[in-house]
Amino acid sequence: MPKIIVLPHTERCPEGAVFDAKPGEILIDVALSHGVKIEHACEMACACTTCHVIVREGFDSLEESDELEDDLLDKAWGLEPDSRLSCQLQVGDDDLVIEIPRYTINQVSENH
């Protein structure tokens, strides 16, 4: 069973986190169930970029992103070559190291 390692983020996951996930599970679902507070303004419908994460290790083990995800990612703050939307990222067979970007573009957040 792959391990998901979330690097520390000042607001979303101050201590970082390590948890198991089953291949095929959606990253944001598993992260939220383990107390990692990834934003998801569109309720995980692949309609915004608030759940943007950077896959620091294990990126090559993931299924490729589709055109809709790629189009949305182009609008994400801090986009990197290994960026993904966690609402679209299916866990593969390998461990993943995930970084939550420092900022997000959230047009509906009241906490800005």
Image (cartoon, rainbow, N blue to C red):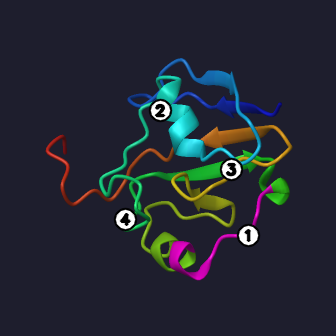
> Which secondary structure, mark 3?
strand
In depth, the one of 42 and 24 nearer the eye is: 24
Amino acid at dot 2: Leu
Amino acid at dot 1: Glu
Sequence-first tag of 4 and 2: 2
> Which secondary structure, mark 1?
loop
Above or below for 88 versus 92:
below
Please check the rendered image and state whether residue 106 is part of the magenta-colored stretch, yes or no. no
- In the rendering, which numbered label is found on residue 32? 2
Spatial CA distance of label 4 from label 2 is 17 Å
Amino acid at dot 4: Cys
Quadrant in which the N terminus appears: top right
Sequence-first tag of 2 and 3: 2
Sequence-first tag of 1 and 4: 4
Spatial CA distance of label 3 from label 4 is 18 Å
Depth-wise, is mark 4 or mark 2 nearer the camera?
Answer: 2
User: Are dots 2 and 3 in contact, CB under 8 Å?
Assistant: no
Sequence-first tag of 3 and 4: 4
Amino acid at dot 3: Val
Name the residue: 32% across, 58% down.
42
Name the residue: 50% across, 27% down.
33
Above or below for 102 versus 79:
above
Spatial CA distance of label 1 from label 2 is 23 Å
Describe residue 29's horizontal placement relative to residue 40 as left or right. Answer: right
